[in-house]
Amino acid sequence: MRILIDTSVLVEGERRNFDLGSWVLGGRHEVFICDATIAEYLAGKPLKDVSKEQRWRNYWESFVSRLTSVPLDQEVCQKAGELLAEARRAGKTVPLGDGLHAAVTELEGLTVATLDVDHFKALGVRAVNSLP
């Protein structure tokens, strides 16, 4: 399966609540992130706990930064806007980051791995919760 990893799943992996590497290898998934994932992950850097910051940095350097990232171009941004507007029309409010992830998912023919499956279903894209 071709998977776009949502930031929520990366955070669980970084916190050691989920072995993302084993999940990827075990499922023989082809995995991607997108540029929105990079921004969200970097914005979540721990600031007050040195040991958490080091763990976060190690995860970034050894795993996250090595993943193929799909760029956010104008086509992706337009698709995200369309998907977010449709969700809003249906009474669902979804964060912009999830809209960008959903647009990449749809345009690239991927399935998003996320903890927020409902957000992505509201956006009309395939989503799986990869955590047991």
Image: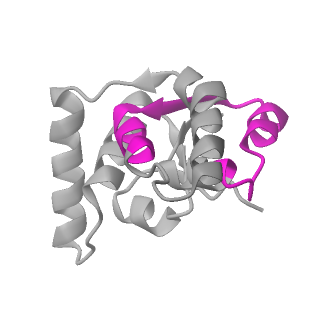
As rendered, which of 120 and 38 lies closer to the eye?
A: 38
Residue 58 drawn in magenta: no
- Residue 85: horizontal and vertical position, in percent? 16, 60
Q: Does 83 sit left or right of 115 as displayed?
A: left
Residue 5 relative to residue 75: left or right: right
Q: Which residue is painted at 50% across and 64% down in the image?
A: 116
The quadrant of the picture occupied by the C terminus is bottom right
Q: Main secondary structure of the magenta part?
A: helix
- Seen in the picture, residue 82 relative to 95 is either above or below; the reply is above
Location of residue 94 in the rendering, given as x and y in whole percent from the top left corner: 29, 65
Q: Nearer the viewer, residue 22 or 124?
A: 22
Q: How many marks?
A: 0
Asked if 58 appears above or below 126 in the picture, the reply is above
| Visual colour scheme | one colour
Q: Residue 61: where, in percent of width, then height?
A: 59, 27
Q: Residue at x 41, y 33 (%)?
A: 34
Q: Judge whether residue 2 can be spotted in this image.
A: no
Q: Is residue 32 above or below residue 48?
A: above
- The structure residue drawn at horizontal position 43% and vertical position 62%, both measured from the top left corner, is 121
Give the extent of the magenta segment.
Answer: 13-42
* Residue plotted at (21% across, 26% down): 73
Question: The N terminus is located in which quarter?
Answer: top right
- Residue 129 lies left or right of residue 6; in this view the side is right
Report if residue 41 is visible in the image.
Answer: yes
Q: Position of residue 25 (x, y in %)?
A: 80, 31
Left of 96 or right of it: where is 128? right
Q: Is residue 19 magenta?
A: yes
